[in-house]
Image: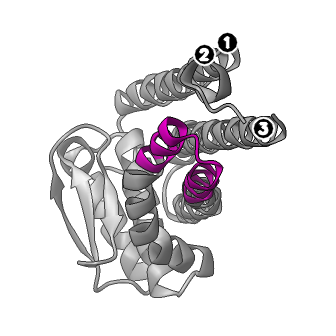
Amino acid sequence: MDYGYGYGYGMDISYLILMVVTMLLGMGAQAYIKRTYAKWSQVPSPGGYTGAEMARRMLEHEGAGSVGIGHVAGVLTDHYDPRDNNLHLSDENFTGGSVASIAVACHEAGHAVQTARGYAPGRIRTAIVPVVNLTQQFWSVLFFLGIAMQHAGLIQAAVLLFGFSVLFHLVTLPVEIDASRRAVNYISQYGTQLDQQGSKEVLTAAAMTYVAAALSSILQLLYLLSRTRSNSRD
């Protein structure tokens, strides 16, 4: 049984190809969302609301009026934190009145509505976050320790820990898609036609980043599993 760095798992050609593919997936998804967001951030919302104002209206309408809205530094750093029950919007989307700002702010409001209504996939994702944070710190250490010691059990345990990251990405997909669906549904009823069109484009582009992350993690897991089986037979 050979777990040597150059033979069992290390920098073989298939691993290099995997790294290039996942890098291109991530870069492509990020370029797509940045380009789409930049396009619609230049288009003022005909409704005249800022992102924070539209998010507040959506929260009140959907029965999540107790959720707060605050600022967060950065660009596209917007998120909802269930721990403090607040939307954290970047300055551009908090005070900005573009179609893109409306889309992003309402998407984050969608996450708050999920929490308020006990949306099951969202609860599952929140529950596994501490586990994923822990496994992400230790799986690679355990993996390379297993290689160094030529210990199949450690390597298999590391692959199992990495599986939690894959699970997190898979659970994240329906959560993000549902939040976007809620945002678009609200905007289609209470926004303008331009808001609806732009929101669909911006949030579809954003969803591609989660699809790319999930696909990359699945490909990496399949690679690790294939190498584990291959080396177990040696």
Which residue type carries mark 1?
Answer: Ile
| Residues under numbered marks 2 and 1 in contact, where contact means CB atoms less than 8 Å apart | yes
- State the residue position of label 2: 16
- State the residue position of label 3: 226
Element class at badge 1? helix
- State the residue position of label 1: 13
Q: Nearer the viewer, residue 119 or 217?
A: 217
- Please determine whether, in this image, residue 9 is positioned above or below residue 116: above
Residue range corresponding to the magenta coloring: 140-163
Residue 66 visible to the viewer? yes
Which residue type carries mark 2?
Answer: Leu
- Please determine whether, in this image, residue 68 is positioned above or below residue 35: below
At 42% across and 27% down in the image, what residue appears?
Answer: 34
Element class at badge 3? helix
Q: Quadrant of residue 171?
A: bottom right
Alpha carbon separation for disc pair 2 and 1: 5 Å
Element class at badge 2? helix
Q: Nearer the viewer, residue 15 or 93?
A: 15
Alpha carbon separation for disc pair 3 and 1: 14 Å
146 is within the stretch colored magenta:
yes
Q: Position of residue 186 (x, y in %)?
A: 54, 65
Residue 38 lies left or right of residue 195; in this view the side is: left
Q: Position of residue 219 (x, y in %)?
A: 69, 36
**Among numbered discs 3 and 1, the one appearing first in the sequence:** 1
48 is within the stretch colored magenta:
no
Q: Name the front one of labels 2 and 3.
A: 3
- Find the residue positioned furthest to the right: 233
